[in-house]
Amino acid sequence: MIRVNAWNTYDEGQQKSCMDLAEDYKEFLSSCKTERECVDRFVNEAEANGYRELNEVRREGGKLKAGDRVYSVWMNKSMVLFEIGKAPFEDGINIVGAHIDSPRLDVKQNPLYEDSDIAYLDTHYYGGIKKYQYVTIPLAIHGVIVKKNGETVILRVGEDEDDPVFFISDLLIHLSQEQMKKPAASVIEGEALDLIVGSKPIRLEENDKDQKEENGGKEAVKKALLGILKEYYGIDEEDFVSAELEVVPAGKARDAGFDRSMILGYGHDDRSCAYPSFRAQMEAHDLDRTSCTLLVDKEEIGSVGATGMQSRFFENALAEVMELCGQYSELSLRRTLANSCMLSSDVSAAFDPSYAAAFEKKNAAFMGMGLAFNKFTGARGKSGSNDANAEYIAHLRQIFEEEKICTQTAELGKVDVGGGGTIAYILALYGMNVIDCGVPVLSMHSPWEAISKADLYAAFCGYKAFFQKASFKNM
Ligand code: MN
Ligand code: MN
């Protein structure tokens, strides 16, 4: 099979569009490191592009027709966007679905403690990480604390130039003889991922001397920190109970390589697919079939919960949209879903020459060689995968060839080496055609992952072509 380096396929105009898209993406990736931040950004941009909030349209007694654009957000962490097409819903719609959660450390619900005059926030990791990658790097805290009165305090510390950052310590090499003998999976234990957040005790006044002697300045650093949290954010220790705070690598996404061909950043999985999916949704117009972009939470932990793909929120939103178009019935909804086409826009593992033994080179995705299609994911004997239908793949091949999109096929490593999944199999439960299709990533799930700008651009062009041309029907 012929593989082409995507850079060689771009003319001057496309090279420029590719680099421009990368600039926008880097800004997005640097600003949006949590699902909530992604949803906020996408809602603002969608509204600027003429999208209206679905429930508002409904409450105002509005109707929807071809060309109208609506979105719906679920619990501030997942969202779905639609541009109504000319064809009836029952003929199927074209869906691109990405996830906007990424592996990270979540702050526990009772996190704050002090040991040896150092204050810590205890964490619980989220998604698949190599725990040892999270020590000794600058970390930021992003998230929300919701107080009992319903007030939401937004926290984002560690990203601005003069912000403090946080970190997790590692044992010095001089004393690591024992540690270095441990297997990588346990060299840093999950419970050792405690974030250092302060070391300065509260200052006791002269007249507090008695108190000082009485409790020996007990937890004086923690007390000082609680004072800071109260002063800056108006929160008490108990408020951590109703907080969602995410510890992520601090700092911006950067160009990588002398040739600036790549981007090093946190959260390419799966924002390098979510971003071009969203942009394609914004830019594909005058559509025959309704276009739909799904940006969901919780993929990294199995698509569970009310904001994960297994939740009914997407189906409910689609039902509401069909109702507003005068096309809803239970049966019509089922026909719509069964006739729809979907690209599960999620990243692929890029072949890594330094770890060649983990890959089967004929069937691996390569960085810079375009949008990667995974007919199936899963583990061992394709267990847990959505194995896309050959007829559907043929339909897509035709579209991507016509539109000169640089594509490649991929498999997640050698057959017996490991595995993984995406949201693909969940949409396939409706009987619709689904295939995984995304950007190859180097060092996936590490604090700083890498992608090629050429692949990001191929993803954007590919998703747009899909919205404009996919028309495969099952019945
Ligand atoms: Mn993913
Ligand atoms: Mn992942």
Image: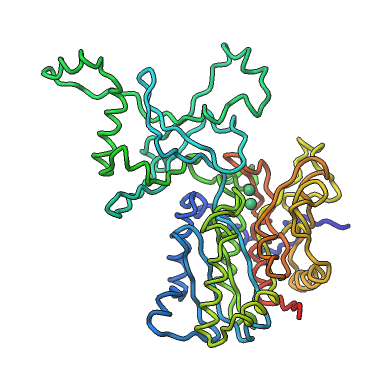
| Residue appearing at x 74%, y 57% in the figure | 372
Give how far across and how far down residue 323 sits, in percent.
Answer: 52, 83
Q: Which residue is at the front of the view, 131 or 461?
A: 131
Give how far across and how far down residue 350 sits, in percent.
Answer: 73, 47
Query: Horizontal placement of 141 versus 132: left or right?
Result: left
As displayed, is residue 191 above or below residue 280?
Answer: above
* Quarter where residue 141 is shown: top left
Quarter in which the C terminus is drawn: bottom right
Q: Which residue is at the front of the view, 421 or 275?
A: 421
* Quarter where residue 200 is shown: top left
| Residue appearing at x 25%, y 18% in the figure | 217
As displayed, is residue 202 above or below residue 44?
Answer: above
Give how far across and how far down residue 245 sits, in percent.
Answer: 43, 44
Give how far across and how far down residue 125 sits, in percent.
Answer: 54, 38
For the rendered model, the colour scheme is: rainbow
Residue sticking out furthest to the front: 330
